[in-house]
Image (cartoon, grey):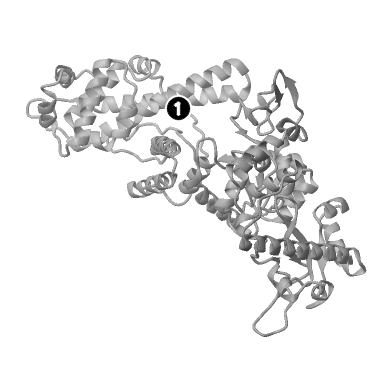
Amino acid sequence: MTLTPQWLDELRSRITLSTLIGRTVKVTRAGREYKACCPFHNEKTPSFTINDEKGFYHCFGCSAHGDAIRWMTDQRGLSFMDAVKELAAEAGMEVPAADPRAAKKAEEQASLRDVTQAAADWFTQQLGSSNGTPAREYLAKRGISEATRKAFGFGLAPESRSALKEALKKFPTAMLVEAGMLIAVDDKEPYDRFRGRLMIPIRDARGRVIAFGGRILGDGEPKYLNSPDTPLFDKGRTLYNLDKASPASRQTNRIIVVEGYMDVIALAEAGIADAVAPLGTALTENQLGMIWRMVPVPVLCFDGDAAGQKAAMRAAMRALPLLRPGFSLAFATLPAGQDPDDLVRARGASGFVDILDEAQPLVERLWAHEVAAGPLATPEERAALKTRLLAHADAIEDADVRHHYREAFRERLDTLFARKQPERGVRQPWTPNAPRGGFGGGGRRFAPDPRLQPPADETRFIGQAGIAAPLIAALIGGLLRYPAVIRRHDEELARLSIGDPADAELLDAMLDIAMRQEGLDCEGLLAILEPMKVYNRATTLLRADGMHFSFNRSPKKNEAIDHDRAQRELSEFISLVNTQAELKMRRLQADEIARARLDDQSIAEQNRLRAMDEDLMHRLQALRESGA
């Protein structure tokens, strides 16, 4: 059908928007407009305005904006045409006639809906009959009340090849086949698709029955059977329970995606009404669009077993290209071996909500999945991890979101490898007695050795000052002597916060040069720096030898320098300096929390970080002494 702009404008003009919205939201007059608490996000102070003269609503809190048709699609979950038809009926307008082919299709769909509704009524009747006793006992065993059974329209398909066909004989056999109620194979007589199954109607966003799911009673395969795709039902464009979950989500500002319709029903029985489920497939782009129209960050709650986690990752992969600012996914993982029914039985609705409250953002789920995918002991394995993570980021089409994902992954990689390096217990030959710290995870808490002596005064000063000027001077002096190290640590060096502007400018220049030219040695680097104003600072740092690190030493007469050792120690020094900067920030935060709370947990964290810091100082001191 052709809906002209003029016809749509006439439709909008006949609808009083405040009255339409006021049916589901409490509105109050505010001058020439109306105000309400926004139905699209939780708020206590009204920021949602309705302007009847201009025919639009707008929320100054979440930027929701639209007209009467948009209200029906976003708030009611209707399709565009269904919204237009409902508003037109209310406004007393005739929807323009469809072209013959579209009219025929609409007529066929209406007829098929008559078939599916008649089938749903018959299945419900069978469940209430004497034939339905085993099915009713099964529902009672599952803890499904009569009220929930009626709300979701449970029914029973008897163990018969022709019972439904006979019950719906007023409809042509071809129509029953097209609606998915019968199976037609070659030239054989069509027979009932669903036999000996507990029947669950599948409804569209307007609550109309369009298909069925059937769970077998007793043994047999498949355990669950859904209707095939029909002119009414496209499983990739349908979410089970959308008609009930959509209005519920407006109250909770949440939508939960679970694996199957029995999970949805178990949650509804526990009082959690804002859950939907795909129908035997991974979440599709269309289904993601549907749930994003309800809330910006839906929670996917899958089983904790391998199959459930695999389904979660498939959903994550499907969502990545579609991410946009403010719209993402969160992932809640159930305990292994438990589904939502098990969990709410054991812990109640509050126990399930606790699981939802611990949901991981999408970026964390991707990170955790890839880190757990394999060992990270070698440079090649670490590089593979980085490649996989950045490939996920590159799949995102929105440039801003893609940029922030890349930055988030880089930060996590830097932190992981900086912390994990000492934890792995790699004993460097030039510092055989360096104490081992407890950086990072692995479940091993740091316990400082009581035999360790307090750090020397100079080391203590370095620790108090953060990235102190002497450390920066030693670092840049080492890089001037060994420019090849710059390329290997470019990201770590670029993150350093340097207080002295001259040193910061010099290091920036060295990074730029090293990135443009490979194979640099000390003389080559100085030759390029010579015309620059930072050259004098570079030569000063080359002459300075006060820190006594191996990578700062100038050879004495008849003395050979171990250049390989110096470069190894310079690399370790860079990691330590970076780690120290991060640790300082964590200590400041921990100190503030400890002073505010004065509880055992916060004080223990404060002591743990202090012990890690002292260990790091010992390692820096060990490096310095090894170069003396």
Where residue 400 sits: x, y (%)?
A: 43, 36
Residue at the farthest right position: 130
Side of 205 where 442 appears, left or right: left
Q: Which residue is mark 1?
A: 612
Q: Is residue 566 above or below residue 466?
A: below
Q: Report x, y in % for residue 584.
A: 43, 22
Residue that protrudes farthest toward the left in the picture: 558
Residue 422, given in percent of the width and then of the height, sits at 39, 36
Which residue is at a point 75% across and 23% down the rendered structure image? 28
Give the answer, above or below, for where 16 lies relative to 151: above
The type of residue carrying mark 1 is: Met
Give the mark count. Answer: 1
Locate residue 435, reporting x and y percent: 39, 31
In the picture shown, does residue 70 fall above or below 455? below
Residue in the picture at 65% in, 55% down: 238
Viewport quadrant of the C terminus? top left
Q: Residues within 10 Å of mark 1 (few under 14, many from 20)?
A: many
**Label 1: element kind:** helix
Residue 101 shows in the view: yes
Apparent side of residue 576 relative to residue 37 in the rendered image (left or right): left
User: Residue visible at 40% across and 21% down?
Assistant: 453
